[in-house]
Image (spheres, helix red, strand yellow):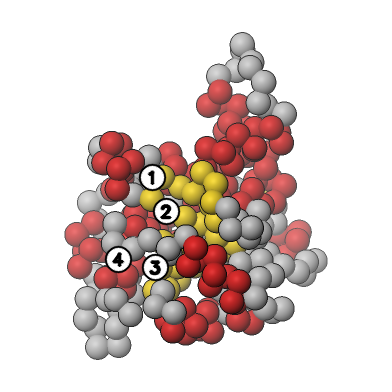
Amino acid sequence: MPSEIYAVCGECWPDGTAVGRIARRHIGNRIGRTVMAQRSPRLAKSVVEVLTIGHSTLPYERFRGLLRLASVTAVADVRSAPFSRHFPHFNRDALRDELRKDNVAYVFLGEQLGGRPKGQRFFYNGVADYEKMAETIDFARGLDRVIEGAKKFRIAMMCSEHDPLDCHRCLLVGRALHERDVRVRHILSSGDIVGHQQVENRLMEMSGKSDIDLFEPPAKRLSAAYRERAMKVAFSERQNNARKPANAE
């Protein structure tokens, strides 16, 4: 497996080679900012693209086929809990090993970019508050790692949900990358790949905010639509206490 993905994402080979070269260069010289926020938007648009995908209930062969159709060369796992009770082929170690056989790199970024926060300050009415989570230094560093990795690999950020609008990979991470002028696109189980702008348009329609409003600017309506959707689908303490199945965010 190529060593660069480990240097970018904070992991390393067993002998310690290729460790931290990129991380050392960036960590410590930013507080709450990302590399892309400091760089030209034109540069980001021209060279940086990140895909997302939800494994859902797919067999591994179909999942692998979707990656191949999109020419993905690395998977960044953004699940907080990288395991699946009902689909063990998506457990972290099993997935990493299978991807390696298919010459696809794998890295786990759930600590920085997962959808299940640690600490009550990141919850609002018992639901994960994506806006507060996006303000942390760890989250910014996670974005930096994805952006740096995307310059060498064709990365797909992976979580569990089928629909991007049901998942933090879109509502939290994809949104943050999009706002940094990274081109974000979402792989659907049909094999179609849709742009983040298309997903935002659907979000606005779902929330009833797509019509022109003379008294509220589009950016404010979009932000409200994101928050409303997140409150419906984000990880909740009530859901966790009830042991509701299926969300690995």
Residue at position x 67%, y 42% from top?
A: 229
Q: CA distance from mark 3 to mark 1?
A: 18 Å
- Numbered disc 1: secondary structure: loop
Sequence order check: which comes first, mark 4 or mark 1? 4
- Say if residue 30 shows up in the picture: yes
Sequence order check: which comes first, mark 3 or mark 4? 4
Tell me if residue 227 comes above or below residue 94 in the rendering. Answer: above
- Numbered disc 2: secondary structure: strand
Residue that carries the numbered disc 2 in the rendered image: 50
Quadrant where the C terminus is found in the figure = bottom right
Nearer the observer: mark 3 or 4; the answer is: 3
Residue that carries the numbered disc 3 in the rendered image: 73
Q: CA distance from mark 4 to mark 1?
A: 17 Å
Q: CA distance from mark 1 to mark 2?
A: 7 Å
Residue that carries the numbered disc 4 in the rendered image: 8
Sequence order check: which comes first, mark 2 or mark 4? 4
